Amino acid sequence: MAEGAAEEDDKAGKAQGQRNGQREGQRRFAQWVRDYRRLPGIPDEFLGPDGKPRAVWSRFFDAFGALAPDEVERRFGMADRHLREAGVTYRAPGESADRPWSISHLPLLIDEADWKQLSDGIIQRAELLELVLRDIYGEGRLVAEGALPAAAIAGSPEYLRPVCGVPPPGGRYLSLYAADVGRGPDGRWWVLGDRTQAPSGAGYALENRLVLSRAFSDLYKSMNVPRVAPFFEAFRDSLRARADRDEPRIGVLTPGSFSETYFEHATLARYLGFLLVEGDDLAVSDNHIHIRTVAGLKRLDVLLRRVDSNSLDPLELEASSRLGVPGLIDVLRKDGVVVANMPGSGVLEARAMLGFLPALSRRLLGEELKMPHIATWWCGQRSARDEVLSRLDEVAIEGAYRRGVPGFDSNGPVLASELDAAGRRRLSDAIAARGMDYVGQEVVRLSTMPVWEQGQITSRPFVLRVFAAATPDGWAIMPGGFCRIAEQPDARAVSMGDGARSADVWVVVSDKQVSTATLLPAVDKVRIRRIAGVLPSRAADNLFWLGRYLERAEATLRLVRALGSPSGPNKGTAASLQSAERIQRLLVTWGAISQTSRAAPGRIVAEALQSPERFGSALSLVRAAQRTATSLRERLSPDAWQVITEMVERLAVEVEDDDSVLSAAELTLQELASFAGLAHENMNRAAGWRFLDIGRRTERAINTTRFARQFAYDEAGDEDLDILLTLVDCQITYRSRYLLAPILAPVRDLAVLDSYNPRSVAFQVTALNEHIAALPSLKEHGLIEKPQRLAVALQAMLATAEAERIEVKTLFALEQDLLSLAEAVGQHYFPHGPNASRPEKLTGLA
């Protein structure tokens, strides 16, 4: 009893010590946060106009400082892990690989008064720009009456003459507007630039909110931060309302997976319930835009475009573009589709326009701009050019129409004061010779906000992008935005391509109730549906090849495991060596290794496992699957994407020994099984799942046939047949059925003809028949179409075949038939260009 009591006292003492240490850690951390307020270099956003800490920041840090340091790091790690597992990425301009998304772990806080100023200014500016666009592409009174120089408009590559005189279908030029803003020296918000082309960042702002609100859920709720869902709901409903059908079909037009912000395009499509489409997915027919689907052409009513205007129609705009839809502009003329934003709206992003907006506001709205922008002089006018040249050392020189300064390598502004004499003279001469290409802007110091860096808080400049959506009830403002934080303390411009971080933006309101609206419809408004949905041909094609790439990787991994296993064909006997050479020849044929050799098996299997140069290595195939999956981000679950990412990361780590090779192969095979399980158990049984499984089944049937040709040839011995049973996972089944050493006919039957074996060719062909029969028919002549005809013939042949009569040439013919089936599926369901078919409608009487 005494010993037990002493033990309990010891445990209690340790627990009390831990609690005391935690309280002390919290006290020191809170004190550190309080002391920080008095440190030099305090962020501008932290202090109000009176020089005292803003209430929202004090409130935030009071709660933040109550967290223990290890708890803070745990929550930061949770946020980073979510971003990594969700595969949140972006691509910097000129780069071929995606970068992981970088988020600041502290949000930007804005109080109600500041937000009121921002919202009022953004709404006024959006309405002004809508009126300016309506005039530029309509009556042209502003130019005719001298309020706006014609050269300032016509000099922009975003000014589209083919759109002149074309009323925007749906009634609006701007559906989504954004402005980059920063806080000025007087504490007011200033506009740094307008985004009217296809404003990006809303999807990343949504992702930032999801990450930070989960990591600091209690703090997020206590700060009374409005949700962003009502903004997206209003935007989605406004696009629906502008279509001419009750239940319109809406697509997000993306340049594709190589776009810098493709992840955002997929996020918006998934969150809003829109289709993610590329130019090749669309076709013009009957004065409307249609999507090429596996069921033929389906009408599209609204396009939320993320493609630059000039690339939208190669017939009337940029002829070399492969991103747009031939004939789109003509469809707009005939009011056949709503495009948001209207092509040509990017003309207002030109810095040349900034200097004219104050006067245009007074002219069109009868009021001054509520939120000013940085002073800008367009050098296309003599007076402004002379002003800029006389103050060349005091202003920043920017391109009038594009990012960067013509004639200089910098992507940002050029300061004459930082140039040598020759550079300064070259800049001055360029402005004097062709002033319309340049603007001079006031040098503005960006406001700074707190960021967490290496375990402490520091200050960094930031730019805030605020979004406005046009709705039937006026402009709706996203309560938050997309905040970009510069890495350098003296940054003058911020871009994600320059290595900046992003931050969530919390608008902190008073104690009034925050809306809990979501994009889920109200229960009483839901109409029950059981529909397969629309599957674009491109998405079906990618799903088909995703399944094939993963199955190819699995086949390669099984060969790697068979060759590298201690119990594999490396025992030194003649039969074993021949079997090993057969595996190597197959790996060479598949492009997994360079050539057969007498090299150590460890080196061979390592090359087949993770050689980046060999297109057939497991690493190359999984990377190909990842690239294909990137084009399907809106259709894959986060769990499925995470499994693919983990496989790539695992195989990319260089192995050190034979055991590591086998371990990596085994673990990757387990992850492939996990993906197959996710697809089988979690994917809706619509056409998308079928094409993924068709790809897997087709490739597995082809690979199993090749395994049988290689290891179940007419003179095959026990060693080769045993390898085949291992490759098709049939060792246990064979032993339980026959209780004999491997014999040719039973092994062939099990691998090729047994419809009960989920690895056999017959099993795959049966599944293919079920899938193809369930797919929509493109013709209504009553005859089965080519893919089904080939699948039925294959199934009949396998069902009537006898194992004793199978020969190598029979297996070769079977392999060719399977390849023909795969090609027929592609030609029938994934057509491009004029080959896209429309469903036939029968006429006449039977």
Image: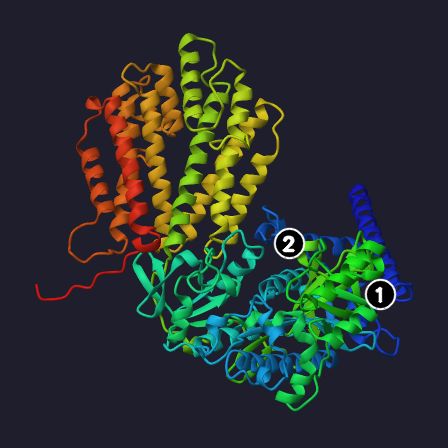
Mark 2: which secondary structure?
Answer: loop
Name the spot of residue 180 as percent of width and height, x first.
Answer: 68, 70
Is there a contact, CB below 8 Å, between mark 2 and mark 1? Answer: no
Q: Could you tell me if residue 625 is visible in this image?
A: yes
Q: In this view, does 74 lie to the left or right of 128?
A: right
Write the residue at 36% across / 18% down: 720
Q: Which amino acid does label 2 sit on?
A: Trp
- State the colouring used for the structure image: rainbow
Compared to residue 295, the image places residue 586 above or below, namely above
Write the residue at 44% across / 20% down: 584
Compared to residue 237, the image places residue 772 above or below, namely above
Mark 2 neighbour class, 10 Å CA radius: few under 14, some 14 to 19, many 20 or more = some
Front-most of 142 and 31?
142
Q: Could you tell me if residue 67 is visible in this image?
A: no
As measured in the structure, the alpha-carbon distance from the residue carrying label 2 to the one carrying label 1 is: 37 Å
Mark 1: which secondary structure?
Answer: loop
Front-most of 509 and 92?
92
Name the spot of residue 689 as percent of width and height, x first.
Answer: 37, 51
Write the residue at 32% across / 35% down: 701
Numbered label attached to residue 101: 2
Mark 1 neighbour class, 10 Å CA radius: few under 14, some 14 to 19, many 20 or more = some
Name the spot of residue 798 as percent of width and height, x first.
Answer: 21, 33
Numbered label attached to residue 393: 1
Quick one: quadrant of the C terminus?
bottom left
Front-most of 831 and 737?
831
Q: Which amino acid does label 1 sit on?
A: Asp
Write the residue at 27% across / 27% down: 812
Q: In this view, does 738 lie to the left or right of 483?
A: left
> Quadrant location of residue 401?
bottom right
Q: Which residue lies furthest to the left in this view?
A: 846
Numbered label attached to residue 828: none
Compared to residue 573, the image places residue 708 above or below, namely below
